[in-house]
Amino acid sequence: MNAHAFDSITADRLRENGSLKWTAFPGTIGAWVAEADFPVAPPISAALHDAVDRGLLGYLPPALVTGVREAYASFAADRYSWVVDPARVHPASDVLTALEHTIRHFSRPGSPVIVPTPSYMPFHTLPRELGREIIQVPMARDAAGRYTYDLDALDAAFAAGGHLLILCNPHNPIGRVLEPAEMLAVAEVVDRHGGRVFSDEIHAPLVRPGRRHVPYASLDETTAGHTLTATSASKAWNLPGLKCAQVVLSNDADVKLWDEVGERIEEGASTLGMLANQVAYTEGRDWLDDVVAYVQGNVTRLGELLEGSGIGYRAPEGTYLAWLDCRDLDLPGGPGSAATFFREQAGVTLVDGADCGAAGRGFVRFNAGLPRPLLEEAATRMRAVLDR
């Protein structure tokens, strides 16, 4: 597919489709929920239509589970050079369900959950719903302005009783693609405290040209020994409503425990979601490459349109999410009001950075997975209200 065909998708068409992203805030450009607005990859669409026509709507067929396991293992080997035993790839409904059960079964009972911030919003709510405290660890900035892990603060969080670290790579919302050396430095802290890692790698296929995703668990025996990895085709191929993710186990102890507790987790994955994920990994790679190139153009164009606006912007290294620094803007309600200001004054709906943790106050998350004309309209509207 020519990715430029994405340009023809209009706001009216997206609203008619009825998604949460485009109907929850009527009349605005939906740049908040982390799903893209691109059409379904043709091989996935064809497979889903065929499945419905054949009546493949029952409980998960064992052959389909095997197919997804093998498809993901092949994809991980080709794209990440990660050799995964297909038998250790397990279905789940979504990454958050995988996180829930990781907290319940694979972390020390009652221990706080460590969340580097700014971070994906449910990382702040889900642990509390399970009766766990959260230890926020604000990320630092290097000389170039890139977010990095504050290893001393991370060490202190483990020393304070934290046991499970939520590591997000590529990192939502800041768009960092973590490098092996920095992940190994994190792993040394985790290992010193006997901690665990839940590695959310759902955005892994969406890495910008010139960068490479390296799964945390693939680094060495230490990272493999303390990690559960969760991923899905849902972000890269835009399939979140089909409810399917993969949990990759990388050590014998977790395999043994999963055999005891994993059945209920696996039952949550939908049959059509499993089929869509299998086809994405096996037949959707060309479509994915078009999307990655298109998003690269989008984040570059967004930077051009925001230049000189007073909004701080660093193009994401991965994901289609842009993290916009509004702390220097002179807004009526202060910088913490930026999301409300742009929704009410510019008609652009964004995520309030404060929902991503205390370190996110004064920022907004902008979803650049838009058709480019709509991205340009959104950025132009934002500039216009700032220039009044």
Image (spheres, rainbow, N blue to C red):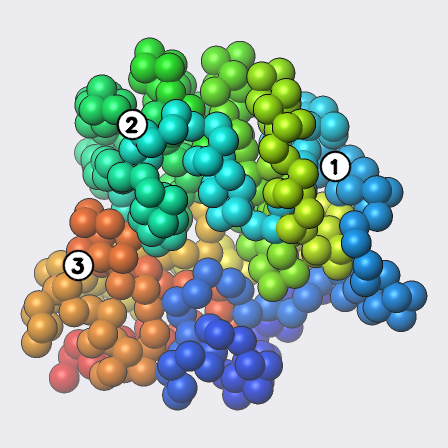
> Which amino acid, mark 2?
Gly
Q: Nearer the viewer, residue 258 or 206?
A: 258
Q: Disc 3 versus disc 2: distance between alpha carbons?
A: 27 Å
User: Quick one: quadrant of the N terminus?
Assistant: bottom right
Q: Which mark is residue 362?
A: 3
Q: Is residue 321 above or below residue 5?
A: above
> Which amino acid, mark 3?
Gly
- CA neighbours of label 1 inside 10 A, class few (<14), some (14 to 19), many (20+): many
Q: Is residue 300 above or below residue 96?
A: below
Q: Is residue 196 left or right of residue 90?
A: left
Q: Is residue 40 left or right of residue 355?
A: right
Closest to the camera, between mark 3 and mark 2, is 2
Mark 1 secondary-structure assignment: helix
Q: Nearer the viewer, residue 201 or 330?
A: 201
> Which residue is the site of mark 1?
69
Closest to the camera, between mark 1 and mark 3, is 1
Q: Is residue 37 visible?
A: yes
Residue 72: x %, y % from top left: 70, 38
Q: Which mark is residue 162?
A: 2
Q: Disc 1 versus disc 2: distance between alpha carbons?
A: 32 Å
